[in-house]
């Protein structure tokens, strides 16, 4: 007797072997429009390689096999090293080869290098997010170190700016590539770094650090930038893994964090036992030094969340094109088509705004562009990172039960989403920063008047929202900081859509995001255009 209970059919194939760049028309257009047309061919090559089944499998393996702390070697000597799965090293090698950690800092960096680097970052984020952490911190630290690297470490400049990944446990001047981590927060303080208790006492040309870090990010880094209390106040120190004489620094790793997501990446607790550190800047300038990097890391938080959202949507849309329910493909069911169209529209606006922000960073020598970046970077980090959590949950619903199972990549994407809202300043910290810029930066409000005035009269929902925000800005209330930041984000995105999207798509975005009286369905032709663009087609 034959026992056959069922056959498998109507099960979509996984999304493998797609070009992550060419299949995303919003990303393609934004990268070219904002100054990275010269990088389009390489971006297409990177997108093709990252979209392969092999690359996606590396992302899965790196998270299924998290790092392991090696406190001692076989002889019992203190080691304080971290062991990673080979998939991690392959992913890191690809990131460094694509210069995601230093593209904008090359001596001969081209105009638009920030935009090109942002596009590469978004592509890599769709494959694996844990590897973004060391890349982001290194990217943010390089400009500070190029200006103020201690003389004993000038040999580090070449490997910092190389395209090589070198995981060997060696002094920095003996390596082909370097990574920089950060050690800011302590048990008692979190974002309130002024309450740090780690002490730094001057000893000749260096300082001796004694204390702890509650989050010591990427402990395998070649050096960390560490905040500690010196005689003159909270200061920033360069703390290398190996000292100039080749000896290990007195930094001990106590344990690795057991995190909700970001499992491929090592986050640790560390203690300093008279560890050697070199002062960066002046004593008491620690916060100012760190803030030089804060904007860069916050921009990456927004870009990383956007990449995760795009990948979740791509998986959902690909599934909907194949899965049948009630006699039609899911993508042809009216309510599902509306859900997918709204998700695509959200990504269209988000992409346009983030790459306008990358262009502002590219042109920060211009005072107006520098102010634009200063204001909208915390706005973007707050809005995009918050939006990502429900967005990925919506993508899960498109797949149904299989989207909730670990064989699918969506659970991993969902676990990754909250970290970017927390790391580098939580939502409230971002909103306080936005209020600080509006209150203390001359010209911030005038910048908004010019920016939003350029599209005034094109959409009544936009005009109404701008009038409402102007009322709030006359007497900003800290308790309404989140509402101010969210409105700034929506108006910033709306302005980009009105400038660059087709009029029907821009009107649909403004109606969906800015009409507080209720949302009408997205027009059928706009739905068609959005879903076509989401698979690489043009309007």
Image (cartoon, rainbow, N blue to C red):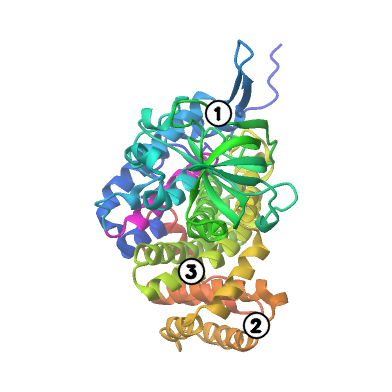
- Residue 491: x, y in percent? 52, 76
The one nearer the camera, 370 or 195, is 195
Find disc 2 in the rendering and name its residue.
476
Query: Residue at position x 47%, y 29% from top?
Result: 89
Can the viewer see residue 187 in this picture? yes
Camera-nearest residue between 219 and 342: 219
Farthest-out residue, right: 188
Whole-angstrom CA distance, mark 3 to mark 1, is 37 Å
Give the magenta-colored segment's residue range. Answer: 111-134
When the figure is inspected, residue 71 is found, relative to residue 359, above or below; the finding is above
Please, what secondary structure does the residue beneath circle 1 have? helix
Q: Nearer the viewer, mark 3 or mark 1?
A: 3
Question: From the viewer's perspective, is 531 left or right of 109?
Answer: right
Disc 1 target residue: 61
Gap in angstroms between the C-alphas marked 3 and 2: 18 Å
Q: Which residue is mark 3?
A: 374
* Mark 3: secondary structure: helix
């Amino acid at each position: 007797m034959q026992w056959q209970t069922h056959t498998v059919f109507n099960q979509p194939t996984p999304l493998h072997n797609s070009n992550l760049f060419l299949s995303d028309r919003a990303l393609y257009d934004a990268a070219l429009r904002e100054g990275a047309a010269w990088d389009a061919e390489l971006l297409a090559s990177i997108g093709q390689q990252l979209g392969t089944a092999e690359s996606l499998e590396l992302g899965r393996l790196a998270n299924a096999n998290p790092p392991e702390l090696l406190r001692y070697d076989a002889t019992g000597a203190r080691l304080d090293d971290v062991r990673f799965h080979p998939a991690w090293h392959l992913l890191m090698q690809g990131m460094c080869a694509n210069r995601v950690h230093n593209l904008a800092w090359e001596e001969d960096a081209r105009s638009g290098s920030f935009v090109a680097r942002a596009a590469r970052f978004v592509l890599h984020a769709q494959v694996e997010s844990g590897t973004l952490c060391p890349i982001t911190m290194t990217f943010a630290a390089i400009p500070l170190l190029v200006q103020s690297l201690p003389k004993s470490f000038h040999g580090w400049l070449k490997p910092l700016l190389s395209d090589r990944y070198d995981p060997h446990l060696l002094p920095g001047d003996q390596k082909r590539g370097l990574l920089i981590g950060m050690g800011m927060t302590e048990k008692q303080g979190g974002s309130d770094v002024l309450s740090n208790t780690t002490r730094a006492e001057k000893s000749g040309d260096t300082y001796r650090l004694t204390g702890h870090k509650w989050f010591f990010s990427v402990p395998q880094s070649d050096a960390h930038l560490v905040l500690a209390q010196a005689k003159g106040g909270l200061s920033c120190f360069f703390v290398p893994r190996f000292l100039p004489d080749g000896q290990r620094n007195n930094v001990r790793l106590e344990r690795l964090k057991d995190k909700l997501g970001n499992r491929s990446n090592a986050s640790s607790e560390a203690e300093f036992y008279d560890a050697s550190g070199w002062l960066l800047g002046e004593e008491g300038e620690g916060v100012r030094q760190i803030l030089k990097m804060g904007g860069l890391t916050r921009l990456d938080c927004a870009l990383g969340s956007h990449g995760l959202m795009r990948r979740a949507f791509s998986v959902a849309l690909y599934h909907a094109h194949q899965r049948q329910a009630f006699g039609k493909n899911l993508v042809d069911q009216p309510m599902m088509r509306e859900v997918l169209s709204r998700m695509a529209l959200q990504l269209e606006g988000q992409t346009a705004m983030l790459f306008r922000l990358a262009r502002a960073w590219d042109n920060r020598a211009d005072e107006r562009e520098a102010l634009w970046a200063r204001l909208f970077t915390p706005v973007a980090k707050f809005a995009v990172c918050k939006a990502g959590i429900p967005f990925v949950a919506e993508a899960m619903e498109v797949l149904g039960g299989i989207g909730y199972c670990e064989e699918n990549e969506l659970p991993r994407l969902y676990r990754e989403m909250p970290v970017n809202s927390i790391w580098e300043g939580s939502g409230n910290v971002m909103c306080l920063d936005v209020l600080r810029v509006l209150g203390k930066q001359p010209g911030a409000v005038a910048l908004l008047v010019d920016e939003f005035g350029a599209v005034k009269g094109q959409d009544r929902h936009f005009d109404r929202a701008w009038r409402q925000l102007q009322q709030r800005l006359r007497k900003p209330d800290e308790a309404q900081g989140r509402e101010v930041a969210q409105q700034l984000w929506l108006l910033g995105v709306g302005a980009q859509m009105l400038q660059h999207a087709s009029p029907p798509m821009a009107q649909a975005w403004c109606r969906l995001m800015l009409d507080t009286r209720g949302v009408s369905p997205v027009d059928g032709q706009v739905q068609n255009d959005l879903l076509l663009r989401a698979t690489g087609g043009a309007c």
